[in-house]
Amino acid sequence: MEPVLLAKRHIENSTDINIAIGEGAYKALQKVLTAMSPPQVHKEVMDAVLRGRGGAGFPAGLKWKFLDKNPKRTRYLCCNADESEPGTFKDRVIMETDPHMLIEGMIIACYAIDAHAGYIFLRGEYANSFRILTKAIAQAREHGFLGDNVLGSGFNVNIHVHVGAGAYICGEELAMLESLGGARGWPRLKPPYAATRGLFYEPTVVNNVETLACVPHIVLRGADWFKGMGSENNYGPKLYCLSGHVNKPGVYELPMGTTLKQLIDQSGGGIPNGRKLKAVLPGGSSSAALTAEEVDVPMDFDSMSKAGSMLGSAGIIVMDDSTCMVNACWNVARFYAHESCGQCTPCREGTNWVARILGRIERGQGEPGDIDMALTICDNMLGQTICALADGAVFPIRSIIQKFRAEFERHVRDGACPFGAKRKWYSVLPE
Amino acid sequence: MPVIRIDQREIEADEGTTIMQAADKLGIFIPRYCYHPGLSIAGCCRICGVEVEDSPKLLMACATPVKEGMVVRTDTERVKMGQRAVEEFLLLNHPLDCPVCDQAGECVLQDYSFTYGFGESRFREQKIKQRKKDVGRDLLLYADRCIMCTRCVRFAHEVSGHDQVGVFNRGAHTEIGVFPGIRIDDLLAGNIADICPVGAFLSKDFLFKRRVWELKSTKSVCPACSVGCSVLLDHADGRIHRLRPRHNPNVNGHWMCDIGRMDYKMVGSADRLKKPLARKNGMLEEISWSDVIAYASGRIRQIITRHGADALAFVISSDATNEEALTFAKLAEKTGSLQNLRLLSGKRGERIEFAGGFVIESDRSPNEHGVLDVLKEFMPRESQERVTDLGSLAGKRGLYIFCGSHSDRGSIQLLARAAAAADFALVHGNVSSPLTEAATMVLPGAAYAEKEGTYTNLRGVIQRIHPAFDPPGDAGHDFDIVLQIAGAIGNSLPFQTVAAASAELARRLRGYVSMEQTGDTGWVNPYSRVAGATKG
């Protein structure tokens, strides 16, 4: 397919506004400001069934619709660019190769929801993205796309970039808004949702980078064009992040619903060194693992959830048969133990406990009963917390244990890792 | 109002309340750590999960508003499983040092472990240890006992408004703490130890003094300012070991201040008067009760016959209960000295208001309002404006002064000079002061923790105090002492008990009720000059 979101990826200096405009940037904005009312923009996005690319797949149009429209309140748009999910790096590519597409998408979204300030909450480690975004925003302001009276239309809008301080939890919608508001990044109790009580306790829409990047294209080419790609109810182009044991890791733009097998074998060029596929985490580290037999599944929201996993952020982590699944599981568990915010009891204590049990098993100190205990701890965490971080820990851990249980049992029985201590883990995390 | 069912029982819940509040109303107990009725909802401890029909997950009872037709179950296997899981998680990194922990016996974690817990641990890893921290004037933080309910953080933000407490680090290493150089030293800090459901925040003052199950609790009223917070006196063997606030929506809400919390020290102090004293050859010497009453009443009669009733003055402090003030005024009425009845005001301090609306009043004595109500009822109208004018007592031949431990220092000095100049000065009080030094005779009285009666606070709320134990040594009950003096002078009063005096008050004073009718939360006098209560 012809690239949409990555169209400017290989154009030199594509982050410069003049080159971007030459490639068609801000055309959609001109169309919106001259020929469309906010409800028309909203209707177009609604008709396109643009589902949120951050992981949950909630339709962006519905999100905008639920926003508190009380004219006395200030509305905000927040762009979630705290891309911290292991295995996910699609938003970075958008921000670093085509920042003006994101800025244009944000301006149009602000116009549609009657917001006059947009915030980009950027992952702290993305220093390069920050440099590029701030420059792009300054250029957009110089060209009159941002600021007061955008392109003479009377519409005012500003965009600010805020750099996070390195917490995975701040990618959670309400924790992000807490952090952005100056507080500790702890998820809030829901309801109320961000649509009624978001940033600075005002109505707020939070959209992912990729979601907002789709908006100018939908507005310019129409909802029907957008729906021409992908599968039923899962339309549009999608960025897939391939990493792990593939020959050609990277970000690939394909229509929604491309199968996982196709992605690994064709886009990724297969498994290196003639090895065999063992397992895949298809939607970032928070998704349930799929075995080699399960990979012939379309990568869209509904098919993936039917397959017992999720599309998530489409961060595909591929593992070949040299991978110790206990080690992989421990690695994932340590990440969540480190990133749990500490608010809810089950997540704060459970993630740490599971990580330490898995570490013991991997080091050959596991005991009979440890595996079942780890599973019951997972059950005790699942669905018991304010946000979905604990669920995100349980899905991969539980699925890996269930699907590769023999390997865990062998670790316990042999008192050692059958893959040998090839890799030394350097870690500040609890062992 | 929405009708909901909890465990097959129907209840009409108030609009906007939660499942927790509706269950409390029905008497169905749902366990809670982070929930505190005086603070905002956190919903983070996750132990109050209940099953709600049509909801796939357990919902937190503390954070879920009631809806018409809601069907809630608090006793199913799933709910119990959730409670067991949270109990197990909370104990993983808990040091289980109950034998040396002050909270043991009133620890929510300990109680729930027995009620909802497993009974044994599956945890075989190393526990995470955190250091004990000295975080305030009266607060120690044993961080590894903490269960991260964040009540302290919300309290410091919402009630005291000083925001010294915060959450640091992440995951299982999360801990409560304060920033470097910051201490929790505001005057509401003591409440943090109270609301901590475990032994993480402990009071230095109470540390290792007593096991809590050895303490008896007596309902009382804090005498340290004219707000009159409802309190519990926790005492054992005739000593108070600590004060705790008692919830009273009419007065203090859930809280009390540290001035009041530490005021109990006066009750057991070495300065307490324990024996009646009389001046012989210029020195105060111990004397028996029968002698002191006979001698004092004789001198009072003598002054009246020689110099007339106007040579006699009566001063009562704002520490006295309403009933004591009534007997005192009756005595002055009988001797014909009502025009010389005076109030000894309490100490004055800065009025402090906190972010959550809690107030420490500038009048730092318990009952100025009530004593004034009583005195003004008896005093002739023309002398009422002199009720606080102690200077006008100079030159009086005889003085009977009922002094209190919260009386104004300057006024005490003034009275001490008047007492030194008088022929006869009878001082009745519970601690030694310049006034007792200048007295002809000293009558040892009771402290607030030792007597019965009512106080009227600044806003006209009449509250009852109960005696926790007897006064020390030979010290007597003030009410009985005044009765005896009156009897010995030959003017028996029309009541013999505090209860009868209280009933008399209810008859005479507008808006007053007898002490039996005040209940635990006090009676709000509808005719009081200042309406309404302080929030807390």
Image (cartoon, rainbow, N blue to C red):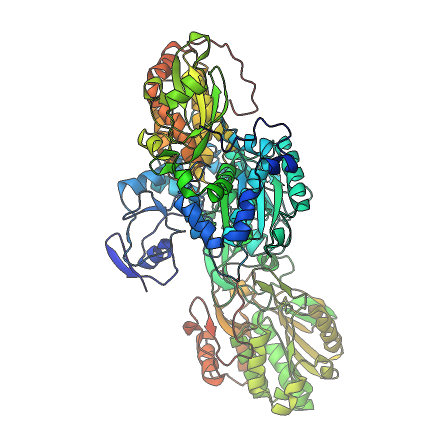
How many numbered marks does the figure carry?
0
Residue B262, image quadrant: bottom right
Q: Quadrant of residue A79?
A: top right
B432 over B393 or under it: above or below: above
Residue at 46 percent of width and 82 percent of height: B504
Depth check, front residue: B43 or B211: B43
Q: Position of residue A191 (x, y in %)?
A: 42, 50
Q: Is residue B334 above or below residue A240?
A: below
Can the viewer see residue B210?
yes
Q: Residue at x 38, y 52 (%)?
A: B64
Q: Is residue A379 above or below residue A274?
A: below
- Give x and y (percent) for residue A144: 65, 48
| Of the pair A411 and A275, the residue shown nearer to us | A275
Residue that appears at 29% across and 40% down: B78
In the depicted view, which residue is nearer to us: A370 or B359? A370
Would residue B441 be found to the left or right of residue A266 on screen?
A: right
The image quadrant of residue A136 is top right
Q: Quadrant of the N terminus of chain B?
A: bottom left
Percent coordinates x, y for residue B51 in the rendering: 30, 46
Q: Residue furthest left?
A: B8
Give coordinates of residue B282: x percent, y percent.
Answer: 74, 70
Return the residue nearer the eye: B452 or A282.
Answer: A282
Q: Is residue A234 left or right of residue A174?
A: left
Instruction: Let me know if residue B102 appears in the view.
Output: no
